[in-house]
Image: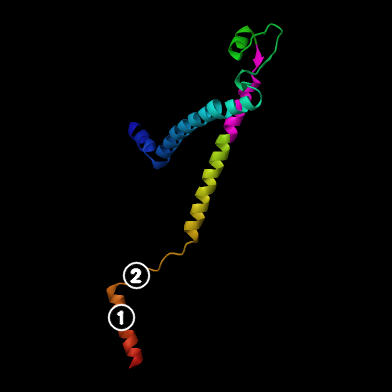
Amino acid sequence: MLKEFQEFAMKGNVVDLAVGVIIGAAFGAIVASLVGDIIMPIIGSITGGLDFSNYYTGLSKAVIATNLADAKKQGAVLAWGNFLTLTLNFLIVAFVLFIVIRLMNQLKRKNEAAPAAPPKPSREEELLTEIRDLLKKA
């Protein structure tokens, strides 16, 4: 059973999937930082210094906090600002993946459309061609 598991784990697809998951997690962290540290502060400054990550709606009258962390301690809240940030995060990731896949498909089509160069004839074929041409002249 251990040998069978080792064979399964070492197949190309499993290793490729593991690499993809690791790169995806790193890419997700980069995009999260891009959205949280660059894009949302710019949007916040355009809208008057608003911090979307702290936007929430309390579901009970007991919630009177000024930030989301304290509000969650006081009761149930709808953290719609955080949801907005994560939605923007998703849209950026989806757009970047769309662009990457589109470029890969264009490269693939370009490689498929390029005609393959005819193979260079061997020395024997060149000699036989010369002999044929000489015989045609004679």
* Residue 43 coordinates in the image, percent (x, y): 62, 28
Secondary structure under the numbered disc 2 in the rendered image: loop
Of residues 33 and 7, the one nearer the viewer is 33
Closer to us: mark 1 or mark 2?
2
Among the two numbered marks 1 and 2 on one chain, the one whose residue lies closer to the N terminus: 2
Is residue 90 found inside the magenta-colored segment of the image?
yes
Q: Which image quarter: residue 131?
A: bottom left
Q: Which image quarter: residue 89?
A: top right
Please tell me whether the stretch drawn in magenta is mainly helix, strand or loop: helix
Q: Is residue 28 above or below residue 120?
A: above
Q: Amino acid at mark 2?
A: Lys
**Residue at x 54% of width, y 47% of height:** 102
Mark 2 = which residue?
A: 120
Is residue 98 toward the left or the right of residue 129 in the image? Answer: right
Mark 1 = which residue?
A: 128
Q: Which image quarter: residue 98?
A: top right
Secondary structure under the numbered disc 1 in the rendered image: helix
**How busy is the neighbourhood of tag 1: few (under 14 within 10 Å), some, or many (20 plus)?**
few
* Residue 19 coordinates in the image, percent (x, y): 42, 36
Tally the numbered discs.
Answer: 2
Locate the N terminus and report the quarter of the image it occupies: top left
Q: CA distance from mark 1 to mark 2?
A: 14 Å
Magenta-drawn segment: 76-91
**Residue at x 62% of width, y 25% of height:** 45
* Residue 38 coordinates in the image, percent (x, y): 54, 28
